[in-house]
């Protein structure tokens, strides 16, 4: 079935690779107009060309979302450009794994700002417009690490447990305004995420684990997001927890 999101306006953060890129394409294939945000302009331009071919009239937003102000700005720019925002996918994130005793707190602070505070800031910026129109859908990307805390992942787990808690509390604040909130919790997905782990032993360990399984693909997560945002508006998928079959 095509055009299930005809004329809907979506903003996907972290759209320059992986899950965000696949999600932007999946939404566009269903007729949504899509704003895409991340730091790497070139990657966004490549995606924008594909989105244009699908008729998604993309809005390209280069932003460093570790800054709350920039998270608010991209929401405002999307609303100004298209006149409103219907679907906000808060996907941008990093995963810095390292043992607590050796942790680089500067790196962890940066991860908390991006994975949690920025997601809160963009959500807050989107709420007034959604409330006024009595519709809207916020999709927050957490992780299996938001449900199960593994060693070497303490701060990453803190961010992703944080996203789960924030999303459920938010849902209960806004459901009476007909605003839906969904949280997605993927297991191991084959993306660039692990490449940025600065602690070498942790990067090697997680890559070795990934090599032992058939990982999820970014498109599998995009499918789950599409499922959430294409339900009739009396249906709110609160939470999707998805692991590779091979993951414990
Ligand atoms: P990728 O590394 O492929 O994508 C991460 C995205 O976030 C990129 O588009 C990147 O763009 C963007 N990003 C990173 N830092 C910033 C920043 N400071 N400002 C703006 N954008 C930023 O990884 P995934 O697709 O896997 O990750 C997407 C989400 O999925 C993350 O929240 C991650 O925690 C979550 N997740 C991933 C899993 C996995 O196994 N891959 C499992 C569970 C959850 P750019 O560098 O251009 O800024």
Image (spheres, rainbow, N blue to C red):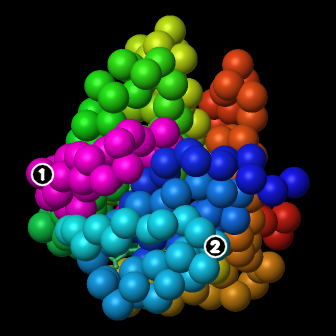
- The residue labelled by disc 1 is 69
> Going 12% across and 67% down the picture, which residue do you hit?
106
Which residue is at the front of the view, 161 or 204?
A: 161
> Going 55% across and 74% down the picture, which residue do you hit?
51
Q: Which mark is residue 54?
A: 2
Ligand number 1: quarter of image: bottom left
Mark 1 secondary-structure assignment: helix
Q: Is residue 47 left or right of residue 211?
A: left
Tell me if mark 1 has few (under 14), some (14-19) or many (20+) residues whose alpha carbon lies within 10 angstroms of its own: some
Q: Which quadrant holds residue 2?
A: bottom right
Residue 224 seen: no
Above/below status of 66 relative to 85: below
Mark 2 secondary-structure assignment: loop
Above/below status of 196 relative to 23: below
Does 139 lie within the magenta span? no
Which residue is at the front of the view, 173 or 81?
A: 81
Give x and y (percent) for residue 34.
49, 60
The answer to whether the beta carbon of the residue marked 1 is less than 8 Å from any atom of ligand 1 is: no
Which residue is at the front of the view, 247 or 57?
A: 57
Mark 2 vs mark 1: give the one in front.
2
- Give, as a single range, the part of the protein colored magenta: 65-93
Q: Which quadrant holds residue 115?
A: bottom left
């Amino acid at each position: 079935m095509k055009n299930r999101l005809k004329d809907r306006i979506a903003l996907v953060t972290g759209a320059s690779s992986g899950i965000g890129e696949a999600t932007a394409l999946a939404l566009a294939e269903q007729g949504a107009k899509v704003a895409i945000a991340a730091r790497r302009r070139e990657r966004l331009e490549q995606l924008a060309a594909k989105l244009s071919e699908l008729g998604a009239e993309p809005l390209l937003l280069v932003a460093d979302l570790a800054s709350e102000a920039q998270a608010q700005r991209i929401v405002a720019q999307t609303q100004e450009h298209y006149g409103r925002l219907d679907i906000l996918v808060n996907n941008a994130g990093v995963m810095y794994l390292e043992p607590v005793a050796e942790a680089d707190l500067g790196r962890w602070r940066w991860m908390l700002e991006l994975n949690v505070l920025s997601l809160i800031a963009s959500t807050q910026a989107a709420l007034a417009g959604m409330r006024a129109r009595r519709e809207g859908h916020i999709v927050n990307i957490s992780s299996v690490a938001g449900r199960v805390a593994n060693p070497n992942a303490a701060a990453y787990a803190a961010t992703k447990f944080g996203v789960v808690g924030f999303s459920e509390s938010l849902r209960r604040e806004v459901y009476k305004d007909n605003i839906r909130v969904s949280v997605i919790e993927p297991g191991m997905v084959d993306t660039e995420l692990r490449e940025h782990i600065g602690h070498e032993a942790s990067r090697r360990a997680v890559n070795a684990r990934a090599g032992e399984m058939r990982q999820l693909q970014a498109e599998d997560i995009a499918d789950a997001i599409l499922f959430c945002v294409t339900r009739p508006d009396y249906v709110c998928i609160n939470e999707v927890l998805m692991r590779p079959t091979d993951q414990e």
